[in-house]
Amino acid sequence: MVTGTTGQTDLHAFANEVDQFLSRTLPRPEVAVGSRDDESDVIEVHGLERRPEPDAAAAVVAAAAWQALRFDADLGWITGPRRYGGRELPPEFERLYVERESAYDVPDVTPLNVGIKMLSAAILGHGGEHLRQTVLPALHRGDLIGCQLFSEPDAGSDLSAVRSSATLHEGTWELVGEKVWTSKAQFSDLGLCIARTAVAQDPHVGLTMFLVDMHAPGVEIRPLRQMNGHASFNHVLLDGVRVPDAHRLGDVGEGWAVVRTTLMSERAGVGKGAKDPAGHALDRMLELVPRLGLGGDSLVRQELADLYSRVRIAEFASQRSQVAPGPAGSINKLFRSRNLQRASTLAGKMLGPRVVASGGVDAMWGDLILCAPGVRLGGGTDEIQLNVLAERVLGLPRDPPIIDGK
Ligand SMILES: Cc1cc2nc3c(=O)[nH]c(=O)nc-3n(C[C@H](O)[C@H](O)[C@H](O)COP(=O)(O)OP(=O)(O)OC[C@H]3O[C@@H](n4cnc5c(N)ncnc54)[C@H](O)[C@@H]3O)c2cc1C
């Protein structure tokens, strides 16, 4: 470990350590501007798979292998507690790592995000000591992959409407129900699952959170195909799945507190990263301008400049709010998902029919146009983020519940 004169790791020494690790470990040199392989360069869209299925499985393996290298170099969980495999450094060290790593061509670790960000936050905040000691290092090393079993056919924005149930039989819970839109369930080892354990007048009471073994008998995973043709979602059926009580997170009936911890971490996670994904899209759109002869098109110029300013604002806002996940994470999520939608709409206008007719690299834009709306839904829709901000930041009265569809 690199330490400064105070005995603590200092940022400068850490930067050297990171640079050495990256230059020593990565098989490929830094990506030089203009040297990209256009066919393989896709714009990263949170949570949505754009690769053919065999490639998606290979991407998970590559992500886990890269994460293991990072973890073994003590760079896998920079802000996490030491006793659970973290480095226990302040958030600016993580920001520095992300920034340095972004200059290299590294495997995309998105497939591990649900485990590393959401399951980890839930276990750290609400799990027993044994779970923390065993599961947290494994998630952060990429040895275990996690998914989030929250949404159901009749419970999305209003998660308190979940109908999956859990009943206790001699120290073991039995789960029955169905979950939907579960990203990466097909690759997962563990699922964070909210289920009803009691009926109460307030639907937020009587829910309990569990960590489900996705390979256990009674778990059935069926792929769901999204509109870009790939299947990153799943329908997960739970038919008498047995879960030991030690894999319960939080108190019985108090699962809503765990849901809140997890969702706050998810929303903050969408807004993290050195660069707004719409910024990657913008870089590629600037390459399109000369190719399509649009440099003199005043509307395109204005919209590109507008997008640039929105991307920069999103990046500044996310840098400022990375100190701790909280309701303001909703701002990051709103900024980034709206920017991506704006970028994809503008790319569609610039390319016109080429988006569907040309194939090759132009098809990437069609894919982005089909993926971007989903980013405004996953992790809580735009309207739900606005409700969070209205209630928890602005102190406005709670959103009135929708009763009988009225
Ligand atoms: C990319 C992606 C990844 C996802 N991954 C997962 C996953 O891994 N695990 C998981 O459990 N789920 C996942 N989901 C599901 C996601 O959490 C839900 O789609 C989301 O919570 C919305 O729920 P819903 O689809 O049932 O829409 P609904 O809740 O039915 O909402 C329909 C519309 O009504 C609006 N609305 C609802 N309530 C209100 C309100 N109170 N005020 C104002 N407007 C309202 C919504 O904004 C939306 O426009 C994912 C979704 C996407 C798109």
Image: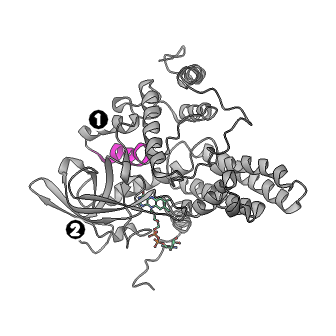
Q: Secondary structure at mark 2?
A: loop
Q: Which SS does the magenta portion mostly show?
A: helix
Q: Residue flagged by tag 2: what amino acid is it?
A: Ala
* Residue 313, image x, y percentages: 70, 50
Question: Viewed as shown, does residue 78 lie left or right of 310?
Answer: left
Mark 1, other Cα within 10 Å: few <14 / some 14–19 / many ≥20: some
* Whole-percent x, y for residue 108 in the image: 53, 41
Q: State which tag comes first along the sequence, 1 or 2.
A: 1
Task: Determine the image quadrant of residue 235.
Answer: bottom left
| Residue that mark 2 sits on | 198
How has the structure been colored for display? one colour
Instruction: Identify the residue shown where x is 49% and y is 41%.
Output: 109
Q: Are marks 1 and 2 in contact (CB under 8 Å)?
A: no
**In screen coordinates, is 276 left or right of 251?**
right
Most foreground residue, 277 or 217: 217
Label 2 C-beta lies within 8 Å of the nearest ligand 1 atom: no
Mark 2 packing: few (<14 Cα in 10 Å), some, or many (20+)? some
Q: Is residue 166 above or below residue 117?
A: below
Cα separation between marks 1 and 2:
30 Å
State the residue in front, 285 or 141: 285
Q: Quadrant of the C terminus?
A: bottom left
Q: Does mark 1's beta carbon lie closer than 8 Å to ligand 1?
A: no
Q: Amino acid at mark 1?
A: Gln
Q: Which mark is residue 133?
A: 1
Q: Using the image, tell me which numbered label, if any, was put on residue 200.
A: none
Q: Which residues are magenta?
A: 115-127
Q: Position of residue 82 (x, y in %)?
A: 38, 29
Asked if residue 384 can be seen in this view, the reply is: yes
Q: Residue furthest top?
A: 5
| Mark 1 residue element | helix
- For the question of whether residue 87 can be seen, the reply is no
